[in-house]
Image (cartoon, rainbow, N blue to C red):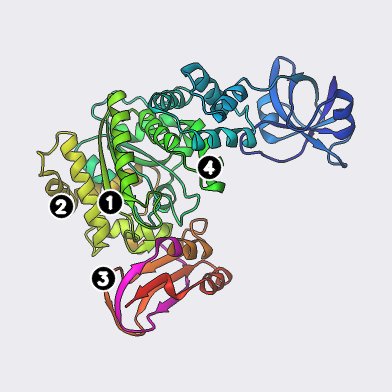
Amino acid sequence: MKFTVKDVDISSGGVLVAILNKRDAQKLDIHNLDRIKVIKGDRVETAVVDIATGRTVKPGHIGLFEEMLSSLHVKNKDSVHIMLARKPLSLDFIKKKLDGKKLNAREIDQIVWDITHNKLSDTELTYFVSACYTNLMDFNETIMLTKSIVAHGTTLKLRKYPIIDKHSIGGVPGNRTTMLIVPIIAAAGLYIPKTSSRSITSPAGTADTMEVLAPVSFAVEKMRKIVEKTKGCIVWGGALNLAPADDKIIKVEKPLSIDAESQLLASIMAKKLSVGSTHILIDIPIGKGSKIEKPYRALKLKREFEAIARRLKRKINVVITDGSQPIGRGIGPALEARDVLDVLSNNDGAEDLRKKSVHMAGLILEMAGKARKGQGEKLAAEILESGKAYEKMREIIKAQGGNTTSSSRIKVGKHRYGFRAYKSGRVTNVDPLHISRIARIAGAPTDKGAGIYLHYKRGDKVKKSDTLFTIHAENSEKLKFAVEALQKDVVVIR
């Protein structure tokens, strides 16, 4: 049947969507979430159907989302043909997993292929995530999922050895150790092509913070040239098409804070494999507010990472760290970038950020054979204190098209509010969840200069009226909202 295209000027963010008028849908016996094939010449795409009950799409017309317009190379008022299509094969396999049964390699691969090619609606993808959350994948299923996610994405081929990678499970504000570890490791002569994420629920992701200093969105070929030139990079993984199925799974996990352990393992390891990593350090912070709050869960996850790495023939070191309070002083992209450059330039930077970064960089140097066991931390500290890591970071920033290499050049939000101690005492708790929430209300990470600067941390002595932390915002209205959201238990003094 022939229809006239209407550009509805909407993007789904992935899934392919077409809109039919209610009268046309009834005539063709098509219902919401049915599939139709939309045909233009030799181009065919399968779309999920939405039904318009009003004037949005008139009879005889078909509304197409941006993804459909782009894929079919059609524009407003073009003519297309449609026909009913069957639902994706993977829906049967998702139901199988919902029933608690195990999936084989072919079934998992079909699910990942459908996810990658936007064949599943968000609702259908959520069922897959839920199935894996309630009926955890076993070890073999997790391995198969990891390999399939890698196979259906772009991969970085450096033809170097070793290739280093590092990943934190997350949940700790200000934990910008990656931006110190990368230049330390690269300055030691090792290759470390680091892909990082943007924030979804935190005040800043590593990519958000690096973007204060340099662009982070590159094609894989450009990323390869940067790494071959400097030995390191810090780029946004979302721009690279590395493990795209994983990005789509994460998108539907976030609203319900679902984090199925098998998918977490597959997600992290797939992204490491997609850049060719041979030696991997995994940081599992534990504590209230972290993704992993209990030590027994962290130990279980550590063993699972080690088992998967053995099967995939990768060297791995999994460390369990303190995630009970923020790392560093700055919370928010610009403030965290200042922290990083202050530590790299040995300019009185945050000691906890420096110490954790040096420790983990030392473990990597030992794992990669650059230092004897027990000597890696010393070598990492020497590279940092000598200024070699700072020079390497300047080189990486320049290669990525940036020029900000001094913390004094980084602007933070000019609207600010200092939260003062209501009594003298000692800081006993800095709540990561509450700190993150206030920083986001102030505008982080969208507003790069927004966030919180912590003047005191747990264990520090304070006097009445000392400024415990300063909220920064780029406009007065957001600062007002952040101040209104403050509670006395943000920082506890006893």
Where's residue 356, x and y in %?
A: 24, 53
Mark 2 vs mark 3, foreground winner is: 3
Disc 1 element: strand
Residue that badge 4 annotates: 253
Disc 3 element: loop
Can you name the residue that lies furthest to the front here? Answer: 100
Q: Assess whether mark 4 and mark 1 are in contact (beta carbons under 8 angstroms).
A: no
Where's residue 229, x and y in %?
A: 30, 34
**Numbered tag placed on residue 386 in the rendering:** 2
Can you name the residue that lies furthest to the top here? Answer: 42
Disc 2 element: loop
Q: Dot 3, crowdedness within 10 Å: few (<14), some or many (≥20)? A: few
Which residues fall within the magenta stretch?
410-434
Where's residue 267, x and y in %?
A: 43, 34
Q: Nearer the viewer, residue 324 or 184?
A: 324
**Distance of mark 1 from mark 4, alpha carbons?**
25 Å
The residue sitting at 27% across, 57% down in the picture is 353
Where's residue 108, x and y in %?
A: 50, 22
Q: Nearer the viewer, residue 371 or 258?
A: 258
Residue that badge 1 annotates: 321
Q: Assess whether mark 4 and mark 2 are in contact (beta carbons under 8 angstroms).
A: no
Mark 2 and mark 3 lie on one chain; the one further toward the N terminus is 2
Mark yes or no: residue 450 visible: no
What amino acid type is highlighted by mark number 2? Ser
Can you say whether 311 is above or below 342 in the image? Answer: above
Q: Is residue 426 magenta?
A: yes
**Numbered tag placed on residue 188 in the rendering:** none
Mark 4 and mark 3 lie on one chain; the one further toward the N terminus is 4
